[in-house]
Amino acid sequence: MKKQLFWFGVVGVSAMLLHFALVTLVLVPLGVPPLVANVLGFLGAFQLSYWGHRRFTFEAGHVPHRQALPRFFGVSCLSFCVNEAMYFALLRYAPLDYRVSLAIVLFAVAALTFLLGKLWAFASAPQTN
């Protein structure tokens, strides 16, 4: 479990930094509204997240892509919906800079992503005898 949490942190922080950089250094400065930029940042970070968690966090190379990829995409979409709702609420109701709000949200959804990734998305199918 310690190894999984370590790699979850490494992959998750890497994906979060990519997401954050895409939103704050590329998209918003180009004039993309923060909520739209957040969607694009999510899609970019998803790729890094899937491959990193598959290879390092959950060591799920034996789980077929046809199972793991749609499941992890579902987990990521659910996490992103929570992310987007929280981000909207913080942007609308909290007197915080959009970057601070985004950082809070990205950390808040990490536990949900880990649990669903471990218990469902990258879980092996039960063996039948």
Image (cartoon, helix red, strand yellow):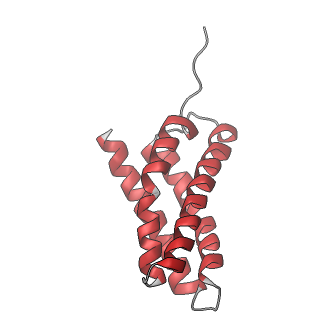
| Residue at the (54%, 63%) spot, across then down | 83
Inspect this view and state whether residue 47 appears: no
Residue lying farthest top?
129
Q: Is 121 left, or right, of 36 in this rendering?
A: left
Indicate the quadrant containing the C terminus: top left, top right, bottom left or bottom right: top right
Judging depth in this view, the residue of 92 and 5 nearest the camera is 92
Q: From the top left corner, tell me how far across and down residue 125 is, in percent.
A: 59, 26
Q: Is 40 left, or right, of 96 in this rendering?
A: right
Inspect this view and state whether residue 94 appears: yes
Q: Quadrant of residue 121?
A: top right
| Residue at the (56%, 33%) spot, across then down | 62
Indicate the quadrant containing the N terminus: top left, top right, bottom left or bottom right: top left
| Residue at the (57%, 85%) spot, across then down | 26
Residue lying farthest front?
93
Q: Quadrant of residue 81?
A: bottom right
Is residue 25 depicted above or below 85 in this figure?
A: below
Is residue 32 depicted above or below 55 in this figure?
A: below
Q: From the top left corner, tell me how far across and down residue 102 is, in percent.
A: 47, 73
Is residue 9 depicted above or below 122 in this figure?
A: below
Judging depth in this view, the residue of 52 and 105 nearest the camera is 105
> Number of labelled discs?
0
Q: From the top left corner, tell me how far across and down residue 88 is, in percent.
A: 57, 73
| Residue at the (47%, 57%) spot, across then down | 109
Q: From the top left corner, tell me how far across and down residue 52 is, in percent.
A: 49, 53
Q: Is 98 left, or right, of 41 in this rendering?
A: left
